[in-house]
Amino acid sequence: MAPERFIISVPSEEDDPDAPLLASFSDYLRRVRGLEPKSREGVLLGGRRFLDWCRHHHPGQDIEALTAKQVLAAVEYRLSLSTTSGSRTAATSHIRTFLRFLYWAGRHHQDLARIVPRTPSWRLAHLPPRLAWEDVRHAIDAIGATTPVGIRDRAVLLLLATTGIRNGELRAIRLRDIDWRTGEVFVRRTKGKRDRVVPLLEETGAALADYILRARPRVDSPYLFLSFTPPVGPFKCAAPVSRIVRKRLRHGGVELGRVAGAHLLRHSLATQLVGQRRPINEVADLLGHRSINTTALYVKVAASQLAEVALPFPGGVA
């Protein structure tokens, strides 16, 4: 009846003067820096925002004429929009990476990345968001396994909660990655670009088998988890999995904060394992951490264990 209302206007490269430069930047991030698509998205967005600022404040100026003073002004503007130490660090890092690309590609005669200031950031200064294990267990038990969606969602939450895999790792699991005899799941192309194996607990394995036999759509797809929304197929981004986690946690009566997705279950599992006095290197292997220092963040929440090693107050009892 009104087809013009359903046509999405997609800007062409002619409408976007920065498209060729950003395409070269994306190719640089992929071939030279070796970044994965999800990581490239954030850095590309930082580069586009930097170019938008330059065009708004210095219209008509070529990128070759960029000065150090202008770079510092752009950085100051980006930092004024950032509210957390993480977002400030990311903003300056993205600008620094883009300026390095300009120098590497011969688009600028100076390496202006050297003048971008580094923002203070303390990696272990915060506590990881986490849930009490009883809340996670209650939310999983509250999922009704009577509908295909409920069966799938229960399998998703059990796999996330018992293995600590990431959102992208869950979406990448294929049917052939499950070894039913040994009770293991092969996780491909992790964040550290390494494959690893995680244990498949009996309850989780039973939930996966129930999903595959009774609920999984009958489509020709190698991936384990599929969306029921047409067109039926694997999850193409992180948002659907995060929505499943948030929905099921809320239905289980869990109060959620700002962070509520697959990573919240990952943090909760790590905290639970550390609280059970599991060796820190064992927890690091399960989570796929390259460095023990990354896993050490969860030791901070083990209050009972920290109390055992705390030194007595030198002033005595007040």
Image: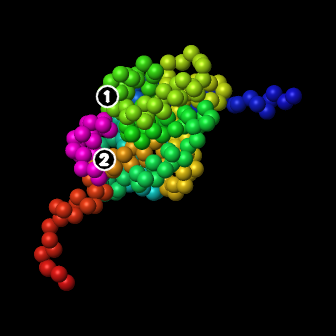
Task: Report whether residue 51 is seen.
Answer: no
> Residue beneath label 2, please?
273
Query: What amino acid is at disc 1?
Result: Arg
* Element on which disc 2 rests: helix
The tag earlier along the polypeptide, 1 or 2, is 1
In the image: residue 127, left or right of residue 257 = left
Query: The magenta stretch spans which residues?
Result: 275-298
Residue 194, compared with residue 92, is above or below; it is above
Nearest the camera: 100 or 312?
312
Classified by dominant secondary structure, the portion drawn in magenta counts as helix
Label pair 1/2, CB-CB below 8 angstroms: no
- Alpha-carbon distance for marks 1 and 2? 19 Å
Residue sitting at x 37%, y 34%: 201
In the image: residue 28, left or right of residue 242 = left
Residue sitting at x 24%, y 46%: 278
> In the rendering, which numbered label is found on residue 196?
1
Disc 2 packing (10 Å; few <14; some 14–19; many ≥20): some
In the image: residue 283, left or right of residue 63 = left
Disc 1 packing (10 Å; few <14; some 14–19; many ≥20): some
Nearest the camera: 74 or 134?
134
Which residue is outermost to the top?
220
In which quadrant will I find the N terminus?
top right
In which quadrant will I find the C terminus?
bottom left
Q: Quadrant of residue 310?
A: bottom left
Q: Quadrant of residue 161?
A: top left
Residue 62, percent across and down? 48, 35
Which residue is outermost to the left?
314
In the image: residue 174, left or right of residue 127 = right
* Element on which disc 1 rests: strand
Query: What amino acid is at disc 2?
Result: Leu
